[in-house]
Image (tube, rainbow, N blue to C red):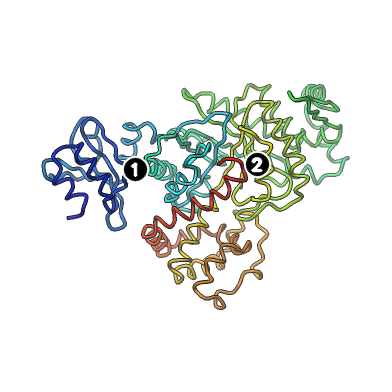
Amino acid sequence: MSNWRKIVENARNIGELKKGLKNQQVPGVYEESLQEVDGSLLFLVKEELDKSLVIVGNNLATDSFEGKVSTIGAFPVKKAPLSAHNAQVLRGLFPWTAPQPFGSSGVSMGLGDRLGLASPGHLKAIKNTKVRPVLAQQSMRELQLTNRTYQDVLDAASWAVFQTGYEGGFGADGDHLKRIEDIKVALELGFSMITLDCSEHIDDGIAKMGTDEVLARYALLPQDFRSEYEELYKKRTHYLENGTAIEIGEEHYYRMILTYHPALNFMEQVYKDVISQLDRALDFEISIDEVGTPTTPQDHFFVANELSRRGIEIAGIAPRFCGSFEKGIDYLGDLEQFEREFVVHGEIAEHFGYKLSIHSGSDKFSVFPIIGKYVGERCHVKTAGTNWLEAVRVIATVDPNLYRKLHATALNSLEKAKNYYQVSLDVANIPLLDELSDTQLPDLLNQDDARQLLHITYGFMLQDPVLKEAIYRTLAKHETMYDDFLSTHLRRHLEPLNFA
C-alpha cells in the first residue's frame, strides 16, 4: 500500500487528510495540486511513471470524472486517468485550468511543448515574474511531426496547471495556422489565441524583381484600387502618435502593395468569416514573418493601418525582422540595424495598440536586451524548440546510449527535416560521436550546429515508436531534472528581456 493510501486510510475527515498529505511530503503526491471541492479532495499522484487524478470523497461536482472507484478507510476513492474526458471535466470544475485570452497589452510568452511534458518547468520559470504564459502552443507542422492533436496539447497544459496549482491564467495558441478548417478545430476546443500565418499570400518574389517588372505588375491592378492606395500611401509621410515619421517612397510603395495586398485580403476573409463570428474574446495575431522578405517599418505600418481601416481587431503582429531568426541559435545579422528598425516596429505597435510579437524567439540572447529596452508592455515572445532541446539535454546527461541513438537518427533524417525548417548548420562542424565520451555529450547542446541538427529533426525521432517510448520513459523518470533544466534555461531568456 503506497503512502498516500495509508494517509487516506488513517484520516478521519477531509481536513485531516489534506493536512496529512501536505505536512508529510508524501512521495508521488503533487502537493500543489491539492484542491478541496464541496467536501471532496482532489490531487495528482505519480505511481511508477504514470500520473492519475485521485478524488477522495463523493459529490455531484466530481461525479463526472471517469475512473475506478474503491473504498479506503472511511472514504470512497476514485482514481481517474488523465484522459481527454477528465481534462474537460477538470476545466469545468476549475476555470483556471482552461485557457484564456490575454488581450493586446502586457507581457506574454509562448512556451511550446512538443512532448506535453514541459509546462511544469515553464511555470516554474515564470513564477514571480510579469510573464503571462501561453502554454498550449503548436502549429499544424508540429502536430503532424509529433503525431499529436490540439486536444492532446490543450489537455497536457490543463493537467500541468492543475499539478502545479497555477491559477494565474494561461493561453492556448493555434500557432501558424493557414487554413480556416484548422482554425475552427482549435476554436471549437476553446483555444484562446489564433496566429494566422499569411506567408502563402505574401509575394516574396517582388523583392527580386527589377523596377520595370514591378511597374508592369502594378499596372495590372484595377484602376480604382491603385487610385485609392496611391492617395493613401504613395510618396506619403505618416506620423505616429509619438511623432516618428513613416516615409513611403514611390518605388517602395509599388513593391509594398504588390507584396502585401493579397495577404491583407486573406486576413480580412479569415476575420470576417471566422474570428468576428465568435461569441467570446480571442487573441488574434497576424504572422507575416515566415517569408524571406524582411518587414520594413513602412511595410509594418501599411499592414497595421490597413487592418485598422478594415475594422480587423488584432492582439498582435509578428513582422519578419531584418537579419535571421533561425531555430535554436542566436540572432544572425546586423545588431545596429536590428535596433534601429526594432525601435520603430515597437512604436508602430504602440501607435495602433497591439503587441509586437517575436517569433522563433528561443535563444536570441544578443537581441533580448534590445527587445527588453524598447518594447515596453506590448510584447509577446514565442519559444518552442529550445524546450525540446532541454529534454534532449536531460537524455544526454542521464542516458548516453539513448542520446547516441537520437543523434544518429537526427543525422539520418536531416535532409528530410530541411523541408520543414530553414537553417544554416554545417554538419562538418559537429563533433563525431565516436570521438566523444559519455560525459561530453551534454556539451553538444551548447554547439550551434548540433543544436540545429537536434532541433529540426525532433519529428523523425518521435515517429520511431521505440525511440519515442524511450524518450518519454526517460523524461518521466527524471521529471524534476527536466523541470529544473527548463526553468534555468528560460530564466536566461526572461532577465535580458526585462520580463523577470
Quick one: label 1 or label 2, which is nearer the N terminus?
1
The three-letter code of the residue at mark 2 reads Ser
Q: From the viewer's perspective, is 190 left or right of 269? A: left
**Secondary element at image label 1:** helix
Q: Which residue is mark 1?
A: 32
Q: Examine the rendered structure and indicate whether residue 393 appears above or below residue 499.
A: below
Q: Quadrant of residue 227?
A: top right
Which residue occupies the extreme front position in the image? Answer: 23
Q: Residues within 10 Å of mark 1 (few under 14, many from 20)?
A: some
Q: Examine the rendered structure and indicate whether residue 433 appears above or below residue 160.
A: below
**Secondary element at image label 2:** helix
Quarter of the image where the C terminus is located? top right
Q: Which mark is residue 199?
A: 2
Q: From the viewer's perspective, is 241 left or right of 381? A: right
The residue at 85%/36% (across/down) is: 216
The residue at 61%/72% (across/down) is: 431
Residue 166: horizontal and vertical position, in percent?
40, 38
Residue nearest the viewer, comparing 224 with 412: 412
Residue nearest the viewer, comparing 149 with 349: 349
Viewer-nearest of labels 1 and 2? 1
Which residue occupies the extreme right position in the image? Answer: 212
Residue 436: horizontal and vertical position, in percent?
55, 75
Residue nearest the viewer, comparing 212 with 327: 327
